[in-house]
C-alpha cells in the first residue's frame, strides 16, 4: 500500500470544518481592514530563499526541499511565503510609489523532524505590508492578529515582542555576544557551539534547559539598540498600551530567519506542548532591496494553520454546522422520476439549502438510515404514494418523538426556508 509521505498530512472531512472556519474569518477580517489577497507559486528558484532567509539559518541549512528541474535549474518548494511575496511585488511593480497591504495562504514545505505541531508540509496564512516605516503599521498587524483570536473565540494566547534594532546595531551586539559565549564555550551544547560563529543570536533561542542560566546572563540586545529603533519600539508599545493589548517584552526573542530587523513578535500558547508558537512575524526593512527592488520598509507575520486548528480543538471551539439540512429519500420508480426536478427546484429557490439527494437506490429503510447518518435534520421522503399525489413526507430526524408531516411538494420550499 502506498502511503502519504511522513510529515505530509491528509486533512480529513472531520477536520476541514475547522480549516474552513479559520479561512472564512481570516478573509472577512483582512478584507474589512483593507488587505488584498495575493496567490503565489509553490516553487521558486532556490536562490530566492538562500538570498533572503540566510545561509546559516535552520531552513536553508537543512530544511529545504531543493531539486534540479529538468533543464538543470535549482528549484525549491517554498519553505515560507515572505520571500515569494517580495519577489512578486517587485516583479509586478507593486511597490512603485505606493503602499501595499497583502495576504496569502497555502502550503509550505520544510524537511523537519515530524512531531506534534511540526510537519513537512504545513500551511500558513501570511500577511505582509510594504511602504510603511512607522510603528503604527507594526501595531496594526498585532491588533489585527489579536482581533482574529477574538473572532475565532480563542483566549489565552500570549503576545511576546522584542526589537532587534538595525543590522548595524546587531553587528556590534554580535561581537559582544560572541565574546561572552566564548568565555563559556564548554558550557555550550554542540548546536550552540556550531552557532557561535555562524549565527550566535540563535543561541539565545535555544530550548535546551541546561543553557538557560547561561543565556539569562548574556548581554542584552536591548542595551545595544540604536536610538531610532528604540523610539520605534517605544511607539509600538504606546499604541499597544492605548489599545489595551497585553504583551511581554522578551529580550530573547530573536526569530529564526535572517531578514528581520527592529520589531519582532510571536503569539504563544502553553497548550500545545513544545510547538507553542502559533503566529510569528516581524519587520524586514532591508529584504526588498536585498532581492533586487528599491529599498522599501516592510513588516509581516505568518500563522501556522495546523497549530491554530489544534488550539481551537483543544479550546472546544465548535466550527459552524455543515451537516445537510435535508436528505431526499427516493423510494420507487415514480419517486425517482420526480425527485431530481424537485431537488433542482429547491436548489434554485434556496441557494443556501444544504440538500443531499440519495443516490444508488436501495430499500426505503436503508435510505432512511443513510439520511440519519448524514447528520441531516430532515428526511424528505418521496415514495410511490407521495409521488402520485405530488406530495412529500417530511420527517424530523432529530425530534425526540418521531414526527412526520405530509405536505404538497410545492409547499416544501417555503417550509425549508424557515429551517435554514
Ligand atoms: P519554530 O520555531 O516552531 O520552528 P519558525 O520560527 O521556524 O517556528 P516561522 O518560519 O516563523 O516559524 O513560521 C511561522 C509559523 O508557522 C510558526 O509560528 C508556526 O506556527 C508555523 N510553522 C513553522 N514551521 C512549521 C512546521 N514545520 N509545521 C507546522 N507549523 C509550522
Ligand atoms: Mg522552524
Image (spheres, helix red, strand yellow):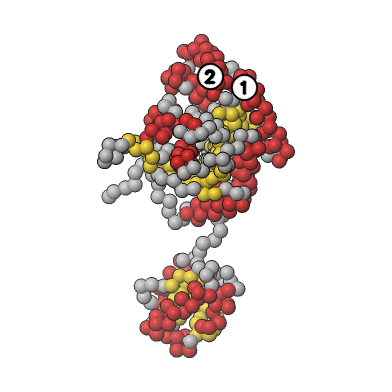
The picture places residue 267, in percent across and down from the top left corner, at 58, 38
Q: Residue furthest right?
A: 242
Residue pictured at 57% horizontal, 69% vertical = 420
Instruction: Count residues near mark 2 (Cα–Cα under 10 Å), then give few for <14, some for 14-19, many for 20+.
Output: few
Residue plotted at (29% across, 40% down): 69
Quadrant in the picture for residue 412: bottom right
191 is higher (above) or lower (below) than 266:
above
Report the disc number at residue 225.
Answer: 1
Residue on which disc 2 sits: 171
Give residue 376's position: percent from left, percent from top: 50, 68
* Residue 254 against residue 300 in the figure, above or below: above
Q: Position of residue 80 (x, y in %)?
A: 45, 39
Q: Position of residue 29 (x, y in %)?
A: 60, 51
Residue lying furthest bottom = 389
Question: Disc 1 on helix, strand or loop?
Answer: loop
Residue found at x 43% / y 69%: 370
Q: Is residue 53 visible?
A: no
Marks 2 and 1 sit apart, C-alpha to C-alpha, by: 11 Å
Q: Nearer the viewer, residue 101 or 420?
A: 101
- Residue lying at 32% horizontally and 47% vertically, measured from the top left: 3
Q: Quadrant of residue 329?
A: bottom left
Amino acid at each position: 500500500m502506498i502511503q502519504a509521505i511522513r510529515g505530509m498530512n491528509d486533512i480529513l472531512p472531520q477536520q476541514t470544518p475547522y480549516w474552513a472556519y479559520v479561512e472564512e474569518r481570516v478573509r472577512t477580517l483582512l478584507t474589512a481592514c483593507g488587505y488584498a489577497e495575493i496567490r503565489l507559486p509553490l516553487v521558486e528558484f532556490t536562490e530566492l530563499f538562500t538570498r533572503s532567509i540566510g545561509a546559516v539559518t535552520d531552513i536553508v541549512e537543512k530544511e529545504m526541499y531543493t531539486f534540479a528541474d529538468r533543464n538543470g535549474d535549482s528549484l525549491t518548494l517554498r519553505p515560507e511565503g515572505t520571500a515569494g511575496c517580495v519577489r512578486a511585488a517587485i516583479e509586478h511593480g507593486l511597490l512603485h510609489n505606493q503602499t501595499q497591504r497583502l495576504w496569502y495562504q497555502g502550503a509550505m514545505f520544510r524537511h523537519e523532524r515530524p512531531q506534534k505541531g511540526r510537519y513537512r508540509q504545513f500551511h500558513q496564512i501570511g500577511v505582509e505590508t510594504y511602504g510603511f516605516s512607522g510603528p503604527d503599521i507594526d501595531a496594526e498587524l498585532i491588533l489585527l492578529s489579536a482581533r482574529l483570536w477574538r473572532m475565532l473565540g480563542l483566549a489565552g494566547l500570549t503576545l511576546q515582542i522584542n526589537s532587534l534594532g538595525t543590522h548595524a546595531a546587531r553587528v556590534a551586539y554580535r561581537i559582544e555576544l560572541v565574546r561572552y559565549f566564548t568565555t563559556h564555550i564548554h558550557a555550550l551544547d554542540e548546536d550552540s557551539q556550531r552557532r557561535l560563529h555562524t549565527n550566535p543570536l540563535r543561541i539565545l533561542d535555544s530550548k535546551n534547559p541546561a543553557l538557560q542560566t547561561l543565556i539569562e546572563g548574556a548581554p542584552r540586545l536591548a542595551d545595544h539598540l540604536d536610538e531610532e529603533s528604540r523610539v520605534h519600539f517605544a511607539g509600538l508599545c504606546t499604541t499597544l498600551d492605548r489599545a489595551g493589548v497585553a504583551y511581554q517584552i522578551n529580550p530573547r526573542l530573536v526569530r529564526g530567519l535572517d531578514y528581520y530587523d527592529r520589531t519582532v513578535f510571536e503569539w504563544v500558547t502553553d497548550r500545545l506542548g513544545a510547538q507553542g508558537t502559533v503566529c510569528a512575524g516581524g519587520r524586514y526593512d532591508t529584504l526588498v532591496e536585498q532581492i533586487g527592488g528599491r529599498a522599501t520598509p516592510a513588516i509581516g507575520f505568518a500563522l501556522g494553520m495546523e497549530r491554530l486548528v489544534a488550539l481551537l480543538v483543544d479550546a472546544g471551539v465548535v466550527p459552524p454546522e455543515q451537516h445537510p439540512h435535508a436528505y431526499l429519500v427516493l423510494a420507487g420508480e415514480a419517486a425517482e422520476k420526480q425527485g431530481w426536478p424537485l431537488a433542482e427546484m429547491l436548489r434554485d429557490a434556496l441557494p443556501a439549502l444544504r440538500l443531499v439527494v440519495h443516490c444508488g437506490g436501495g430499500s426505503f429503510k436503508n435510505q432512511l438510515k443513510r439520511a440519519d447518518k448524514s447528520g441531516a435534520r430532515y428526511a424528505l421522503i418521496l415514495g410511490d404514494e407521495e409521488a402520485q399525489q405530488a406530495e412529500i413526507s417530511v420527517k424530523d430526524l432529530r425530534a425526540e418523538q418521531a414526527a412526520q408531516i405530509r405536505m404538497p411538494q410545492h409547499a416544501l420550499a417555503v417550509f425549508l426556508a424557515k429551517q435554514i
